[in-house]
Amino acid sequence: MLEESNWNSTNVKTADGALFVSYRGQNHSQLQVMRYFKQPRVPMILITGRPESLMAELATVWTFTGMSTTS
């Protein structure tokens, strides 16, 4: 069941797509929406800093945006 604030996502169809951005890949409300989209197979793109996250597992495709440190 989606939280009340996520009901606007119920109009998305399989011909649409969804873009998610989360550094940790653990955002509760975004995870809820991604689980909801998984059943009708809505394509999902994730931009994340953690490719091993649960959100990355649910996404159709993901891209890693890591920070490089220099000394």
Image: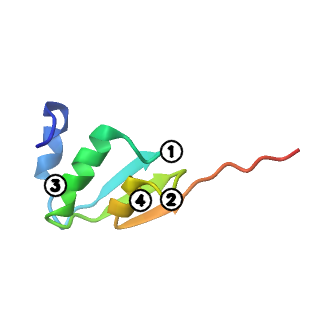
Q: Is 40 on the left or on the right of 63, as rendered?
A: left
Q: Is label 4 or label 3 in front?
A: 4
Q: Position of residue 35 (x, y in %)?
A: 22, 54
Circle 1: element type = loop
Question: Is residue 7 positioned above or below 25 on the image?
Answer: above
Q: Quadrant of the C terminus?
A: top right
Pointer 2 and pointer 1: residues touching (CB < 8 Å)? no
- Determine crowd level at label 1: few under 14, some 14-19, many 20+ residues with C-alpha closer than 10 A: some
The Cα–Cα distance between marks 3 and 1, rounded to whole angstroms, is: 24 Å
Say which mark, if any, is on residue 23.
1
User: Mark 4 highlights which residue?
Assistant: 56
Q: Earlier in the sequence, mark 1 or mark 4?
A: 1
User: Mark 2 highlights which residue?
Assistant: 51
- Determine crowd level at label 3: few under 14, some 14-19, many 20+ residues with C-alpha closer than 10 A: few
For the point 41% across and 59% down, which residue is it?
56
Q: Is 48 on the left or on the right of 32, as rendered?
A: right
For the point 49% across and 59% down, which residue is it?
52
User: Mark 3 highlights which residue?
Assistant: 12
Q: Earlier in the sequence, mark 3 or mark 1?
A: 3
Residue type, numbered disc 2? Pro
Q: Position of residue 8 (x, y in %)?
A: 15, 41
Residue type, numbered disc 3? Val
Residue type, numbered disc 4? Ala
Marker count (numbered): 4
The Cα–Cα distance between marks 1 and 4, rounded to whole angstroms, is: 11 Å
For the point 11% across and 43% down, which residue is it?
1
